[in-house]
Amino acid sequence: MVLSVKVSVDNVIHLAHTVDITPTGARINCSLRTQLQPGTIIGLQRGPRKADFRVQWTRELGPDEQQVGIESLKTQNDFWGIDLSDEFEAKKDMQTLMTALSRCSKSVM
């Protein structure tokens, strides 16, 4: 889900957007002059909400552009401002269905 966020690195604010979000983290795309490294602590702001996140991985997309996997340092209640429970239940239901179908196809062979 694409959401606009502000990323704070060394007290410099950068604009970014999410690619995927979860209750505990996200994958974001951002244009930075500074290369982020796994373990770096960054600040994120979504509207009035602010939180610190740890960079888990990075991937260079182009000059000064990175995709970054981040994980929240603290449990966040509704940091993204979106109810994610339906999305996660749907994914869990799909995974259960795929597992059942996989078992059925193995027994037919």
Image (cartoon, rainbow, N blue to C red):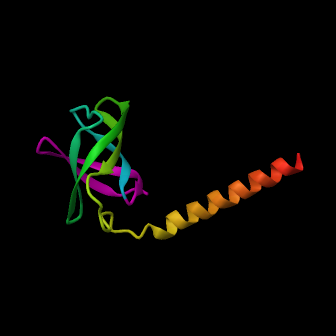
Residue at horizontal 76 percent and vertical 56 percent from the top: 101
Q: Position of residue 70 (x, y in %)?
A: 33, 46
| Residue farthest top in this picture | 63
Q: Position of residue 45 (x, y in %)?
A: 22, 57
Image-quadrant location for residue 109: top right
Magenta-drawn stretch, dominant element (helix, strand or loop): strand
Please tell me in which quadrant of the rendered image residue 47 appears: bottom left
Q: Residue furthest left?
A: 11
Instruction: Point out the residue furthest to the right here.
Output: 109
Residue 102, image x and y in percent? 75, 51
Please determine whether, in this image, residue 34 is positioned above or below residue 54: above
Q: Nearer the viewer, residue 72 or 36?
A: 72
Q: Nearer the viewer, residue 105 or 15?
A: 105
Closer-to-camera residue (106/26): 106
- Residue 68 included in the magenta stretch of the image: no
Q: Which residues are magenta?
A: 1-23
Please, is residue 32 above or below residue 86 in the view? above
For the point 32% across and 35% down, the residue is 65
Residue 11 sits above or below residue 45 on the image? above
Q: Please report the residue visible at 30 percent of the width from the left and 61 percent of the height from the top.
A: 75
Q: Indicate left or right for 56 with 41 as reference.
A: right
Q: Is residue 71 left or right of residue 83?
A: left
Q: Is residue 6 magenta?
A: yes
Residue 55, x across and y down, in percent: 30, 41
Please state the total of marks drawn on the protein image.
0
Q: Residue at x 43, y 57 (%)?
A: 1
Asked if residue 20 is positioned above or below residue 12 in the image, the reply reads below
Give whichever of 4, 42 is nearer the camera: 42
